[in-house]
Image (cartoon, rainbow, N blue to C red):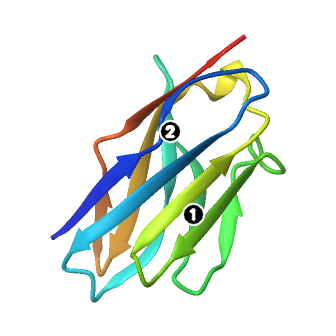
Amino acid sequence: QVQLLESGGGLVQAGGSLRLSCAASGSLFRLNAMGWYRQAPGKQRELVSTITKGGSSNYADSVKGRFSISRDNAKNTVYLQMNSLKPEDTAVYYCNAEAGWHDYWGQGTQVTVSS
């Protein structure tokens, strides 16, 4: 089992920045990719960004150039730096981790961007 603890959400004005963190604990010997998804009210959960243990990353087109994902393997922690935030970035952000054949999810952290 892998547990994920997210932090860093909040309320910010458009154009502002936030940094999300997600720390993994538990059975981590098969931990591989980690990343972030988000779900806005009335919409499906969507990929924001992921990063492998080796550092390869990918981003949704909607956040490219504004968001940056990074990872500290020694701390089993993944970060999402979000800059130039827009009201349409408002959502619950969920941390995700792949370990072996399993997907694990955090409880989510609310990000609200006011116009």
Q: Which mark is residue 69?
A: none
- Which quadrant holds residue 108? top left
Image coords of residue 62 (percent x, y): 75, 40
Give yes or no for contact between labels 2 and 1 (Cβ–Cβ under 8 Å).
no
Provide the residue designation for mark 2.
38
Ranked by sequence position, the earlier of labels 2 and 1 is 2
Horizontal side of 30 relative to 109 (left or right) equals left
Q: Check the image and report above or below for 82 versus 111.
A: below
Task: Pick whichever, 109 or 47, lies toward us.
Answer: 109
- Which quadrant holds residue 25? bottom left
Element under disc 2: strand
Tag 2: amino acid = Arg
Residue at the spot 50% in from the left edge and 25% down from the top edge: 40
Image coords of residue 1 (percent x, y): 15, 70
Provide the residue designation for mark 1.
50
Instruction: Quadrant for the C terminus, please.
Output: top right
Residue at the spot 79% in from the left edge and 45% down from the top edge: 66
Image coords of residue 13 (percent x, y): 69, 19
Residue at the spot 46% in from the left edge and 17% down from the top edge: 42
Q: Check the image and report above or below for 96 versus 46.
A: below
Residue at the spot 29% in from the left edge and 60% down from the top edge: 104
Horizontal side of 60 relative to 4 (left or right) equals right
Element under disc 1: strand
Task: Pick whichever, 87 or 20, lies toward us.
Answer: 20
